[in-house]
Amino acid sequence: MVTVVGGGFAGVEAAWAAARRGAQVRLVEMRPVRMTPAHKTPLLCELVCSNSFKSKLATTPAGRLKQEMVALGSLVIPTGEAHAVPGGEALCVDRDRYAEAITSAIGSHPAIEVVRTEFDGILVEQALRDGPVILATGPLTSAGLSAYLAELAGREHLYFYDAVSPVVDATTLDRSVIFAQSRYDKGGDDYLNCPFDQESYARFVQELVTAERAPIHDFEAEDDEHKVVDPRLREERFLEQIKYFSGCTPIEAIADKGARSLAFGNFKPVGLRDPRTGRRPYAALQLRPENRERSLFSLVACQTRLKWGEQKRVFRLVPGLENAEFVRFGVIHRNTYLEAPNVLTERLEMRARRGLFVAGQLTGVEGYVESAAMGILAGIHAAAVERGERVGPPPRASAYGSLLAHLQDRTEREFAPMNINWGLFQEPEPPIKDRGRRQEVKLAAAEAAFTAWLPEALGFAVR
Ligand SMILES: Cc1cc2nc3c(=O)[nH]c(=O)nc-3n(C[C@H](O)[C@H](O)[C@H](O)COP(=O)(O)OP(=O)(O)OC[C@H]3O[C@@H](n4cnc5c(N)ncnc54)[C@H](O)[C@@H]3O)c2cc1C
């Protein structure tokens, strides 16, 4: 019996992968018995924030990783494709239908039993007597299990923060101002753009940086060794920690850096032309559809920890959003992950506890797709152990190997969660200067290496 703890992206993939390879699987999910601060439903694989699985293009790192996942028998990616909503080059999904479809697929698999309860260390140890256990409890792992991990791994928890963008009702957008266009007309007109002129931009930034921010809670600003009481130090600690995940820096923290930082960053207007003026706007806030019906739009790259009332006031200063109704406000969340290079083997097994595997964001990858990818891998290894077999780790050159290289890299550094990106792929030898050519060579090497390893990973598959 393989026990998987956590029914998120990694957990469902781990359960699916192990069951497809002949294991009896128990999938343990604590919701709805106990909710996390971010999840809202009892559904498996709930998307807590954006509905994007990033690029569909096989020539991008995220696209390449998806291809490898599909080749290994992914559940998460094909279900995403079946419930896709417009998202340009990105694979975006209808979050409710998507999570319902995953819950139904897992629930109807004859080899998977879903158990709704919160697991702690004692229950994990008990489950280990029945076979391998995979911990896939994610960035909001409950306290009891975190304590067990802390004890097992020694120095394990590092905290940082994700910031969520607000979502608005499409019918409340001023379409006489907002125009549909993707940058450089790539990807159709999935994106909507709120164009700023210099004056409206300056007013927005001024209000953004002076608006009231949500207080930083004790549990967000302290770590295992320090409780940060001084408000200034708390702020410093907070910013220090969120910088670990620079892609998710709150918009107000970016605006703090200088009056034009948004115009050169999140609101960069390149590749856009405002049909009202025939010119590029001074800056543009983009909106992306949140569902198939395009009835909801999220404010792209507007993750924020402003107080909710302030969010409404400030974002309504954006041209075209004057009457916007907010169906979800931006919020800030803590993340939990292990320092993988010191605690995990290349098979995602805890060095300190044989038979205990870790998957998903807990391993130190970041994002829905990367977490799911690590779920498949942990499921394969656990199923192999259950049958007394062993599968070698994916080759370094593959997208999988690139993520694993990040988790195994013991160079002295501040280990932080990472999305799949070109920088993780193996550098060609001899080095290639031209960026485009270098990426082509990396992709070709990834494909060749992965294809050579695939039969081993599928070798004991039961279909
Ligand atoms: C607020 C927030 C916003 C995010 N936004 C994005 C985003 O926009 N894009 C993106 O790609 N990634 C985002 N992430 C990261 C994303 O959540 C993860 O990459 C992905 O969900 C991780 O998958 P996972 O399976 O590791 O964890 P999860 O998907 O979180 O699944 C973990 C599951 O374990 C359950 N669980 C926890 N503790 C226990 C326990 N003790 N016993 C039983 N069950 C337990 C939880 O209820 C949950 O269902 C965000 C994370 C947070 C917290």
Image (tube, rainbow, N blue to C red):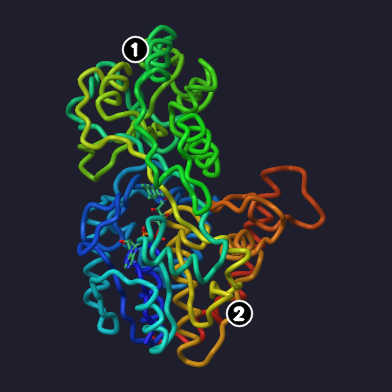
Q: Nearer the viewer, residue 290 or 162?
A: 162
Please identify the residue farthest to the bottom as the structure is shown: 388
User: Would you place residue 298 above or below residue 456 in this image?
Assistant: above
Please identify the residue farthest to the right as the structure is shown: 430
Report ligand 1 position as a quadrant. Answer: bottom left
Q: Residue at x 24, y 45 (%)?
A: 292
Please identify the residue farthest to the top as the structure is shown: 199
- Provide the residue designation for mark 2: 392
Name the quadrant containing residue 41.
bottom left
Instruction: Give me the C-alpha separation between circle 1 and circle 2.
Output: 58 Å
Q: Is residue 28 left or right of residue 256?
A: left
Q: Nearer the viewer, residue 69 or 343?
A: 343
User: Would you place residue 359 above or below residue 24 in this image?
Assistant: above
Task: Find residue 237 and report its horizontal and vertical position in percent.
Answer: 52, 38
Task: Find residue 154 and report its horizontal and vertical position in percent.
Answer: 56, 66
Quarter of the figure with the C terminus: bottom left
Within 8 Å: ligand 1 and the Cβ of disc 2? no
- Provide the residue designation for mark 1: 276
Q: Amino acid at mark 2?
A: Gly
User: Would you place residue 149 above or below residue 58 in this image?
Assistant: below
Q: Nearer the viewer, residue 282 or 186?
A: 282
Looking at the image, is mark 1 or mark 2 nearer the viewer? 2
Q: Nearer the N terminus, badge 1 or badge 2?
A: 1
Q: Nearer the viewer, residue 192 or 331?
A: 331
Within 8 Å: ligand 1 and the Cβ of disc 1? no
Q: Residue at x 42, y 72 (%)?
A: 73
Q: Residue at x 45, y 37 (%)?
A: 229
Q: Amino acid at mark 1?
A: Arg
Name the quadrant containing residue 322.
top left
Q: Residue at x 24, y 66 (%)?
A: 103
Q: Is residue 459 left or right of residue 172?
A: right
